[in-house]
């Protein structure tokens, strides 16, 4: 895509759904967020469903794996949002997020990948990699790459799927 939101270089018009979703979430229209600028700017990936296509349930626990060598020159972050307000999800935690600069206590796997857990309470022994959610409330997430590198753009690096570990689906 690009900041003009065109289907087939404009021959089929504008992709209004994608444009509206982006405006609703980011409330801006900047070419820099959609251009390929290796090592500069930022790229965001939005996810709202698990590996089975079910919307996220704040009562359930999920595991999300970021493979080794996350392609971010500066840093990466993972942030959980409220779909009704498009603001960060309000929880008892200081931040509904994990950040490779701020959260130096996160535990990486032996192969360099990292597992992020989302749920109302941290799985045993996983609190350093846990993002709190709210029971009975849906949510969505953004993976943000600051200074995105070539493996992001050429898609040789891809984040894993969200695997539902426990909890009932209420929606």
Image: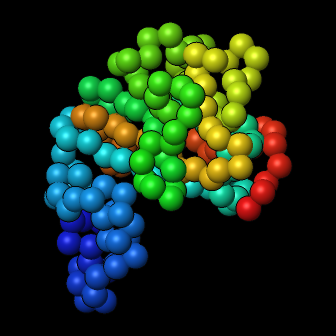
Residue 53 locus on image (x, y percent): 68, 60
Residue at 73% over, 37% down: 61
Which is more toward the observer, 89 or 162?
89
User: As displayed, is residue 99 above or below residue 13?
Assistant: above
Would residue 116 be found to the left or right of residue 39 on screen?
Answer: right
Q: Residue farthest to the bottom? A: 12
Quarter of image, res 35 = bottom left
- On the rendered structure, is 59 left or right of 55? right
The image quadrant where one finds the C terminus is bottom right
Place of residue 98 in the rendered image (x, y in percent of width and height, measured from the top left): 47, 27
Could you tell me which residue is drawn at 51 percent across and 42 percent down?
Answer: 89
* Residue 86 visible at all: yes
Q: Classify residue 87 as left or right of residue 153.
A: right
Q: Is residue 69 left or right of residue 2?
A: right
**Residue 63 visible within the image:** no
- Identity of the residue drawn at 36% across and 63% down: 24
Where in the figure is residue 77, as x and y percent of width and height? Answer: 40, 32
49 and 81: which is toward the camera: 81
Q: Quadrant of residue 58?
A: top right
Q: Nearer the viewer, residue 101 or 96?
A: 96
In the displayed structure, would residue 116 be above or below residue 90?
Answer: above
- Residue 110 percent coordinates (x, y): 60, 13
Above or below, 92 relative to 169:
above
In the rendered view of the protein, which quadrant contains the N terminus?
bottom left
């Amino acid at each position: 895509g690009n900041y003009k939101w065109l289907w087939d270089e404009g021959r089929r018009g504008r992709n209004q759904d994608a444009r509206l979703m982006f405006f609703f979430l980011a409330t801006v229209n900047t070419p820099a967020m959609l251009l390929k600028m290796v090592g500069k700017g930022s790229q965001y990936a939005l996810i709202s469903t698990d590996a089975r296509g079910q919307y996220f349930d704040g009562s359930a626990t999920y595991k999300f794996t970021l493979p080794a060598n996350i392609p971010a020159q500066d840093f990466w972050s993972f942030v959980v949002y409220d779909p009704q307000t498009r603001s960060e999800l309000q929880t008892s935690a200081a931040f509904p997020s994990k950040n490779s600069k701020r959260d130096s206590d996160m535990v990486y796997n032996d192969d360099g990948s990292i597992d992020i857990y989302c749920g109302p309470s941290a799985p045993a022994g996983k609190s350093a990699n846990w993002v709190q959610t709210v029971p009975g409330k849906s949510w969505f997430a953004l993976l943000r790459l600051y200074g995105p590198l070539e493996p992001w753009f050429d898609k040789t690096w891809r984040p894993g799927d969200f695997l539902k570990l426990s909890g009932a689906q209420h929606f």
